[in-house]
Amino acid sequence: ANQMYRITFGSINFAAYRFKGWINEKGAAIAKEDANGIHWVDTKDADTGATYYYPEITVFDQTQPMTFIASFEAKTACTLTFTSSDENKGTVSASVNGTSIISGNNTVFDEDSVTLKAEKKTGYKFAGWKVTSPADSGVTFEDATAEEITFTMPKIKTLTIQGVFEVDPEYLNPDCELTKVELLKQDGTLVKQ
C-alpha cells in the first residue's frame, strides 16, 4: 500500500534565518520539481510572511531511500541608529515590518522593511534623510526628501541615518504679524496711519 509523508518545519525563527531550499545527504540541491512520488508545496510562515516550500512524498513498495535536509542561512543582524539633526527643529522615528523600534537599541535583519518618519516642529521644515555611517552602506531612498520613507535593510552590522531639519524661510510667526503701522515724527506725533 502506498503511504504519503509530509516533511514540514517545527518552530523556525524566520526573522533571523532565511530558507534556502532542500539538499540531500551529500549537500546537493534537490530540484523543486514534481517527480518520483515527490510533490512540492509552497507555503508562507503565518508570523513573518516568509515563504518556503516542503515535500509531500508518496512511498511505493519499490521507492528507494531518500534524504531531505532543509537548508537555512543566518541573516545579518544590524543595529539601526536614527537621529535628528536638531531635536528642537524636528524628531524622527522608525519601525521595522510595522513594529516601532528604539534608536540604537534594536536588531534589524537584512531584507527587513524599515520605515523612517520625520516630524518637523513649527517654524522648521524637513530637508531630507542622510546616511551618516557607513558611507558605503548601499542604502538608497526612492525620495530622500519625503517625510516618510521605506527601504530594505542591506547586509551590514550597523547603520546610522539622520533626519535633517532646517529653518522654514516661508514660516510666518503669528507673534510677528503686523496689525497696525504708524509713521511718527521724532517727537512722537503721528504723521500717517
Image (tube, rainbow, N blue to C red):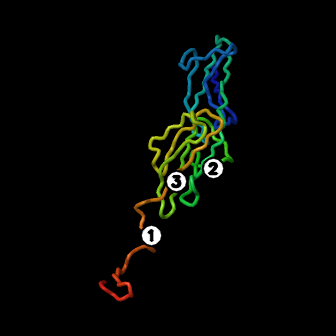
Per the image, the residue denoted by label 3 is 118
State the residue at coordinates (48%, 41%).
Answer: 141
Nearest-to-viewer mark from 2 and 3: 3
x, y percentage for residue 186? 38, 84
x, y percentage for residue 129? 51, 46
The amino acid at mark 1 is Asn
Residue farthest to the left?
A: 192
State the residue at coordinates (54%, 38%).
Answer: 152
Near mark 3 (Cα within 10 A), the count class, few <14, some 14-19 or many ≥20, is: many
123 vs 39: above or below: below
Per the image, the residue denoted by label 2 is 101
Pick whichever of labels 2 and 3 is earlier in the sequence.
2
185 vs 120: above or below: below
State the residue at coordinates (57%, 14%).
Answer: 36
Per the image, the residue denoted by label 1 is 173
x, y percentage for residue 48? 60, 40
Q: Are marks 2 and 3 in contact (CB under 8 Å)?
A: no
Closer to us: 3 or 123:
123
Residue farthest to the front?
A: 186
Real-space Cα separation, disc 1 to disc 2, in angstroms: 34 Å
Q: Secondary structure at mark 1?
A: loop
Nearest-to-viewer mark from 1 and 2: 1
Real-space Cα separation, disc 1 to disc 3, in angstroms: 22 Å
In the picture, measured across the screen, residue 188 lies left or right of residue 36, that is: left
Q: Are marks 1 and 3 in contact (CB under 8 Å)?
A: no
Near mark 2 (Cα within 10 A), the count class, few <14, some 14-19 or many ≥20, is: some
The amino acid at mark 2 is Ile
In the picture, measured across the screen, residue 190 lies left or right of residue 85, that is: left
Closer to us: 54 or 143:
143
